[in-house]
């Protein structure tokens, strides 16, 4: 109970150090009149929440003066007493003796020095992740915290050191913001119709929903899982899935990607490359880097630059990339990750593996060729979609329907979906109309 009260008391306080050192409670300034008391407070604020040894406080306030200040150790308790009286105002003490030193339990969010340095670190991260607008906003907010010279009215060697350090970081922030101003105004970036809102680095999850009634392909799935989750690898695993139209390549790839999701905690990227209206490689690269957290106007217009940025963003991440319907190697190649922590799963129509690189170029490569389902798997799929009771009433018609669909999961699922939408129809009613509904 006492610690929770102390915490609430700390949250009510606010300290400004990027200018004259002041303490505030609920908008009211607390009077700390003595310069040495403010010097002690400055040392404690820089390490808020941690015990500061007595010797470190003395050196920061009075310096290493030896015999010139024989009473400084005796003076410190008086400084602490006055600070405690000013800060606590009758409430639970946030300044206490601990481990041969003193500890100030002040909330870091209520100290402008801490907020300033945290914003600079966040801005640097945003720049590394190609988020210039977020970085500029963070830098502007950090610079707005300043009201004058840091610790302007505080004596002692620690305050002098802090003034130099914080002034250097302030100059650094100003230079970075100027660089971002020039970068955001440059004609090389795609203009944004409106200001992109501030957002954190993203963990994309673009996979389509998994099929709850996915059936069969057990051996193939096991081989893919072994390839995608192999721990001893030096390059990104690559899986290619080929087969005729209707063989269920898309459903297989999505199902396998969902199963392997835990091995790729930084997300999954997905692109549908089927048909003439499919997005171009540069468009997919732009979509991928946006999904990874890059702001719209920071997406490079040049395709080569987009690809470089894409690989840079994946360098320290574990992301699974699924390319569904890559008709040629040219369509898939530029989108494949090169970071060893990532992996790719590519589907394409055709009888054999899609050539995506020279032999030995990738450490773990596995080719899957999907064909017809076995009659038993075809019946199991129909049963999962239609229900076993409905299937049991017309076993012969169900077997005929599977044969007409050439035991391919795409046409089978399309036919079963039609029957689901028409519960009054018998299975036999669809058999003469089925010519192998399409699907991949």
Image (cartoon, rainbow, N blue to C red):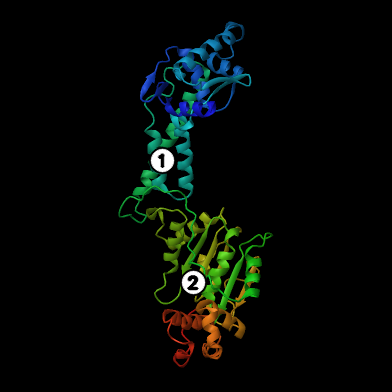
Residue count near mark 1 (Cα–Cα under 10 Å), binned few <14, some 14–19, many ≥20 = many
To which residue does mark 2 refer?
331
Q: Is residue 234 above or below residue 163?
A: below
- For the residue labelled by badge 1, is the local secondary structure a helix, a strand or a loop? helix
Q: Is residue 174 above or below residue 237?
A: above
User: Residue at the location (69% across, 60% down)?
Assistant: 232
Quadrant in which residue 403 is drawn: bottom right
Badge 2 or badge 1: first in the primary sequence: 1
Q: Is residue 294 above or below residue 51?
A: below
Who is closer to the viewer here, 390 or 117? 390
Is there a contact, CB below 8 Å, between mark 2 and mark 1? no
**Image disc number at residue 138:** 1
Give the residue at the far bottom of this rendering: 432
Give the residue at the far right of this rendering: 232
User: Residue at the location (41% across, 38% down)?
Assistant: 175
Is residue 156 among the parts visible in the rendering? yes
Is residue 47 among the parts visible in the rendering? no
Residue 139 in picture, x, y percent from top left: 41, 39
- For the residue labelled by badge 2, is the local secondary structure a helix, a strand or a loop? helix
Who is closer to the viewer here, 364 or 210? 210
User: Residue at the location (35% across, 56% down)?
Assistant: 190
């Amino acid at each position: 109970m006492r610690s929770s009260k102390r915490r609430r008391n700390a949250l009510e306080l606010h300290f400004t150090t990027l200018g004259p050192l002041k303490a505030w409670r609920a908008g009211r300034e607390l009077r700390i009149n003595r310069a040495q008391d403010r010097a002690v407070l400055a040392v404690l604020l820089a390490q808020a929440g941690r015990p500061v040894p007595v010797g470190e406080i003395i050196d920061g306030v009075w310096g290493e003066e030896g015999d010139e200040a024989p009473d400084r150790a005796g003076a410190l308790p008086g400084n602490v007493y006055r600070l405690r009286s000013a800060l606590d105002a009758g409430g639970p003490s946030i300044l206490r003796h601990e481990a041969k030193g003193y500890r100030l339990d002040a909330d870091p969010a209520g100290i402008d020095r801490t907020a300033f340095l945290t914003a600079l670190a966040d801005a640097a991260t945003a720049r590394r992740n190609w988020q210039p607008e977020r970085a500029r906003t963070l830098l502007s907010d950090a610079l707005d915290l300043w009201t004058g010279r840091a610790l302007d009215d505080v004596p002692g060697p620690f305050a002098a050191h802090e003034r130099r350090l914080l002034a250097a970081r302030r100059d650094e922030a100003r230079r970075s913001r100027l660089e971002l101003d020039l970068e955001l105004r440059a004609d090389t970036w795609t203009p944004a119709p409106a200001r992109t809102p501030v957002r954190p680095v993203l963990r994309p999850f673009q996979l389509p929903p998994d099929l709850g009634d996915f059936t069969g392909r057990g051996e193939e799935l096991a081989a893919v899982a072994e390839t995608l989750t192999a721990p001893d690898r030096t390059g990104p695993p690559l899986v290619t899935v080929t087969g005729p139209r209707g063989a269920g390549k898309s459903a297989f790839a999505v199902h396998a990607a969902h199963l392997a999701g835990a091995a790729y905690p930084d997300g999954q990227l997905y692109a549908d490359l089927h048909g003439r209206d499919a997005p171009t490689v540069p468009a997919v690269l732009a979509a991928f880097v946006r999904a990874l957290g890059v702001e719209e106007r920071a997406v490079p217009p040049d395709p080569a630059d987009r690809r470089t940025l894409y690989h840079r963003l994946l360098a320290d991440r574990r992301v699974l990339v699924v390319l569904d319907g890559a008709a040629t190697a040219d369509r898939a190649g530029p989108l494949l990750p090169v970071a060893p922590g990532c992996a790719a799963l590519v589907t394409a129509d055709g009888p054999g593996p899609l050539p995506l690189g020279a032999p030995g170029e990738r450490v773990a490569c596995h080719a899957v060729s999907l064909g017809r389902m076995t009659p038993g798997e075809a019946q199991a799929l129909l049963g999962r979609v239609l229900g076993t009771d409905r299937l049991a009433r017309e076993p012969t018609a169900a077997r005929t329907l599977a044969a007409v669909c050439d035991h391919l999961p795409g046409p089978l699922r399309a036919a079963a979906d039609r029957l689901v939408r028409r519960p009054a129809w018998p299975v036999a009613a669809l058999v003469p109309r089925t010519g192998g509904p399409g699907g991949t």
